[in-house]
Image (cartoon, rainbow, N blue to C red):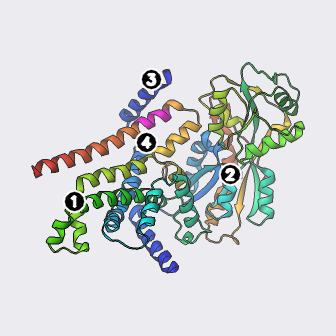
């Protein structure tokens, strides 16, 4: 019980103290996860829509694979990116290992299947409802994609937030490819692992509460934007 | 097809990296080291004076000694500071490093529940203590992760003439901190390096029960990596770090570092 109370006090003093090191960690967490989600969204939404509209041999297997990758363990994604970016690996020349860029790459791999698979499902349902209408308007499949994505935007916002949840919560991938270097690649989740391993459980839990608060803020912002857009639609 | 994919990926990554890290300078090295040095706070104490003297930033990747060797072997770190003298010498012999030097030492300690069911508190030697734990079939938490501490623990079982096996011997496959957390949770005996133990904040019923045997000596070494094998590494900067660790200033900074009023690392460079 005392540990829990300590954790809330610690979280509060962390927020009020505005420690510059902590602010750096928070900023990097947001930068890495939001970049990963942005990239995964730009690739995943059109990909999901295309999968929903086109029928081709092997489509079923591709959908199953995509759905399965939603369960990809972060540590496996991290290890794969590590082997790619390591000096002994195919992309080692770039010298990207242990940088925030490597962390973004690993998180894109984790987030992309979630966004693409869930978008595919949403677009497919929407297309099922409206495809007579869309066809009568004489739209080709390529031209349908932006229309369908726009019509599904509120549902897709939740899809993107699910992707952001995955990115901000994972620790296995960023730990391996980032290395948890102080001031360079340390983010909220790796800091929590470090404090836990030092046995400073109140600080670790305090950081966890702070992370949860941050994720809640991002979700609240998305919700407000969605609501105001809905409001304008009437 | 495979090749174009790689080139495209490389181009994309290069663009992404320019976008996200244009502001970072080049005068830094990656140091692969152990969790004991990082968790105790040693680097927070000795890196600022080094960076001030040389304008070189040291970026520490703290992992188990086994993984640290692997990172260096693949050419992903510029410098290496670990604690497994035999492993370090093999690393030099295999041509991955050109020089190894003693930097500092401390010792391992045997931690266990305050009640001490195996009664190791009055054992004469650490081999005796380990033998008593096995005889009492008291829970023992092993790192089980091929770290320097894990390798030291295996040598101690060998010295005790025990092949640890059975439900009482629990291989956790974790770092020092998580292993201490687990040991505290299940009132197990555990071998820890003194620095991690003293800095550890969650001991619960655990206490230091046995210390002081020469077999518990824990030597840390710094390695200069091979320029032949990995020409891309920042060997000039890494050499400055290596020399500074061994210099009067570096050794003094190590000696001055204390946690809770205790000196945790004792400098012993020979030059």
Q: Chain of mark 2?
A: B
Please say if the residues under marks 2 and 1 sit with CB atoms less than 8 Å apart. Answer: no
Q: Which mark identifies residue A22?
A: 4
Look at the magenta stretch and give its main secondary structure: helix
Q: Residue at x 45, y 44 (%)?
A: A188
Compared to residue A15, the image places residue A151 above or below, namely below
State yes or no: residue B1 in magenta: no
In this figure, which residue is indicated by the disc labeled 1?
Answer: A129
User: Quick check: do tags 1 and 3 share a chain?
Assistant: yes
C-alpha distance separating marks 4 and 1: 49 Å
Callout in the foreground (1, 3) = 1
User: Quick check: do tags 2 and 3 share a chain?
Assistant: no
Callout in the foreground (2, 1) = 1
Q: Residue at x 67, y 33 (%)?
A: B197
In this figure, which residue is indicated by the disc labeled 3?
Answer: A5
Please say if the residues under marks 1 and 3 sit with CB atoms less than 8 Å apart. Answer: no
Please give left or right for residue A42 compared with residue A196 in the image.
left
In this view, the residue in front, B102 or A210, is A210
User: Quick check: do tags 2 and 4 share a chain?
Assistant: no
In this view, the residue in front, B237 or B221, is B221
Compared to residue A138, the image places residue B94 above or below, namely above
Compared to residue B180, the image places residue B5 above or below, namely below
Q: Residue B46 occupies which quadrant of the picture?
A: top right
Q: Earlier in the sequence, mark 4 or mark 3?
A: 3
Query: Badge 3 local density, few (<14 within 10 Å), some, or many (20+)?
Result: few
User: Quick check: do tags 4 and 3 share a chain?
Assistant: yes
Please say if the residues under marks 4 and 1 sit with CB atoms less than 8 Å apart. Answer: no
In this figure, which residue is indicated by the disc labeled 2?
Answer: B245
Which span is picked out in magenta? A203-209
Please give left or right for residue B126 compared with residue A149 in the image.
right
């Amino acid at each position: 019980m005392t540990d829990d109370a300590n954790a809330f006090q610690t979280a509060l003093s962390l927020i009020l103290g505005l420690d510059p090191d902590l602010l750096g960690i928070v900023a990097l967490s947001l930068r890495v996860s939001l970049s990963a989600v942005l990239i995964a969204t730009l690739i995943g939404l059109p990909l999901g829509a295309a999968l929903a509209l086109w029928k081709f041999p092997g489509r079923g297997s591709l959908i199953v694979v995509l759905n399965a990758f939603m369960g990809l363990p972060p540590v496996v994604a991290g290890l794969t990116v590590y082997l790619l970016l390591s000096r002994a690996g195919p992309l080692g020349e770039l010298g990207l290992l242990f940088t925030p860029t490597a962390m973004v790459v690993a998180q894109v791999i984790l987030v992309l299947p979630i966004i693409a698979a869930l978008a595919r499902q949403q677009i497919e349902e929407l297309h099922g409802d409206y495809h007579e209408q869309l066809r009568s308007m004489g739209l080709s499949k390529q031209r349908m994609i932006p229309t369908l994505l726009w019509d599904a935007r509120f549902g897709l916002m939740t899809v993107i937030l699910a992707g952001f949840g995955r990115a901000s919560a994972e620790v296995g991938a960023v730990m391996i490819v980032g290395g948890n270097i102080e001031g360079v690649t340390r983010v909220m989740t790796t800091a929590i692992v470090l404090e836990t391993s030092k046995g400073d459980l109140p600080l670790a839990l305090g950081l966890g509460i702070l992370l949860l608060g941050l994720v809640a803020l991002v979700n609240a912002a998305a919700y407000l934007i969605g609501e105001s857009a809905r409001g304008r639609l009437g | 097809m495979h090749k174009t994919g790689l080139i495209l990926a490389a181009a994309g990554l290069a663009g992404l990296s320019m976008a996200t890290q244009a502001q970072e300078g080049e005068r830094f090295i990656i140091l692969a080291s152990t969790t004991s040095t990082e968790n105790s706070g040693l680097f927070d104490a000795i890196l600022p004076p080094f960076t001030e003297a040389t304008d070189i930033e040291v970026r520490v990747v703290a992992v188990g000694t086994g993984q640290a060797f692997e990172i260096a072997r693949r050419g992903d770190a510029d410098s290496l500071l670990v604690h497994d003298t035999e492993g370090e010498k093999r690393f030099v012999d295999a041509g991955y490093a050109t020089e190894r030097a003693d930097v500092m030492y401390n010792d391992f300690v045997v931690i266990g529940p305050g009640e001490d069911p195996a009664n190791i508190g009055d054992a004469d030697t650490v081999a005796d203590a380990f033998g008593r734990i096995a005889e009492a079939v008291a829970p023992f938490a092993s790192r089980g992760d091929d770290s320097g501490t894990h390798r030291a623990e295996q040598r101690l079982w060998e010295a005790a003439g025990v092949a640890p096996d059975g439900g009482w011997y629990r291989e956790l496959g974790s770092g020092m901190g998580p292993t201490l957390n687990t040991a505290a949770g299940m009132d197990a005996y555990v071998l820890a390096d003194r620095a991690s133990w003293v800095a550890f904040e969650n001991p619960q019923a655990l206490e230091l029960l046995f210390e002081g045997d020469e077999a518990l000596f824990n030597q840390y070494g710094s390695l200069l990596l091979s320029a032949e094998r990995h020409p891309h590494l920042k060997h000039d900067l890494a050499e400055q770090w290596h020399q500074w660790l061994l210099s009067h200033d570096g050794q003094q900074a190590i000696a001055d570092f204390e946690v809770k009023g205790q000196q945790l690392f004792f400098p012993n460079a020979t030059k």
